[in-house]
Image (cartoon, rainbow, N blue to C red):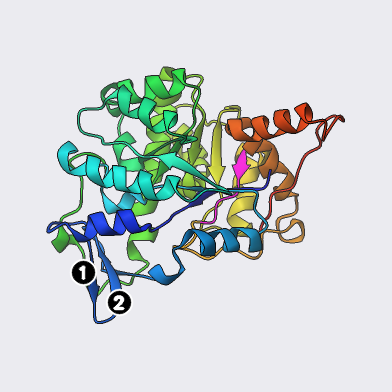
Amino acid sequence: MRVDVHQHFWSEPLIDALARRRELPFARSEHGLDMLYLAGERPFVLDLSTETAGQRAALAELDGLDRALVCLSSPLGIESLPRAQALPLIEAYHEGALALGEPFEVWGALALESPNPGDVDRALDRGCVGVSLPAGALASVESYARLHPLLDRLQAREAPLLIHPGPGLGAVPRAHECSLEDPLWWPALTRYVFDVQTAWLSFRAAGRAAYPRLRVVFTMLAGLAPLHAERLSSRGGPSPDEHDPLTFYDTSSYGPSAIRELAERVGADRLLYGSDRPIVEPNPYLDSESLGFDLRAHAASAARRVFTFAAGARAQASARGEDRRAPRTPEVALQ
């Protein structure tokens, strides 16, 4: 299976739901442009002309993908809204994402207020491969107790968790915290990195012990948090996670130098390919020559350990008599 574990999709149901809102986050059409307004960031221009199932499937084929997984963009702050506001937007996201069809799979989204394990069941039962949560929701040791109903059900259902930058409950940035003097990339290099690094540290301190069987995927290489292992040890922190076989890292937004360093720290077999399309164009330099190892093979192997659909596809092929040999390691398409 050639898998991209981290994409987004601005579906018509989601944009329509955001357009009906009068408070952040909301969407507007202005001067011929489709604009997205969210707390703590400058307005973002959306190219909705390319956000159709057919065009996104064509891009996935161009990228050489067998599967592309879409998730809710957590910096919007949807999961952190009051439950009555969050649920209609989450439903709109699920409606649009699940209608994509092949080759797409969907990460489910959950409201953070009043955590309800039934939300996990509904997302998985309607076809989501796992659940994504904003990193800000896991920014402290105590957050694992508050989110226990969700995480416990996710572990019991043997479904993976994706940790994506975004605010936790009650932590949505105020609109005035965004300065028009800041460049567009400023939040992605400051708050996003802080979010996922903090979530990684809290997971090392409390999350893994509480949920020993939970498969966890950190986006954007966890903001390179594992590279701070020496400083963590010097301050009396928990041991780094070199030997945690159920924690994985997607490569979104990073290139060869960072990927090489993280692979040396945690092992190349725990890297997954993520592009963050359409927010970020796929990195064209993730080949064996640039990296010094075959990320394609390692990412394919990791995907088989994280996602049940990869094992299911092999089992179905075997049942049809299409592959009677021992399965070989497939390649993951990397741009």
Residue for badge 1: 179
Give the magenta range: 270-275
From the viewer's perspective, tell me whether residue 302 is left or right of residue 108.
Answer: right
Q: Tell me if residue 84 comes above or below residue 205 in the rendering.
A: below
Report the amino acid beneath label 2.
Leu
Q: Is residue 271 magenta?
A: yes
Q: Quadrant of the N terminus?
A: top right
Q: Taking 223 as reference, is 180 left or right?
A: left
Between the C-alphas of marks 1 and 2, the distance is 21 Å
Q: Label 2, secondary structure: give it.
A: strand
Question: Between residues 54 and 63, which one lies in front from this camera angle?
Answer: 54
* Residue displayed at 12% across by 59% down: 22
Give the residue at the far right of this rendering: 325
> As displayed, is residue 330 above or below residue 184?
above
Along the line of sight, the residue nearer the viewer: 242 or 309: 309
- Circle 1 — which element? loop
Tags 1 and 2 touching, CB below 8 Å: no
- Disc 1 marks a residue whose amino acid type is Ser
Question: Where is mark 2, residue-wise?
Answer: 33
User: Taking the image as drawn, is residue 48 in sight?
Assistant: yes
Where residue 215 sits in the image (x, y, percent)? 52, 29
Q: Where on the picture, by quarter, is residue 290?
A: bottom right
How far from the left and from the top, in percent, is residue 317?
Answer: 75, 33
First in sequence: mark 1 vs mark 2 = 2
Corner quadrant of residue 181 = bottom left
**Left-right relation of 134 to 273:** left
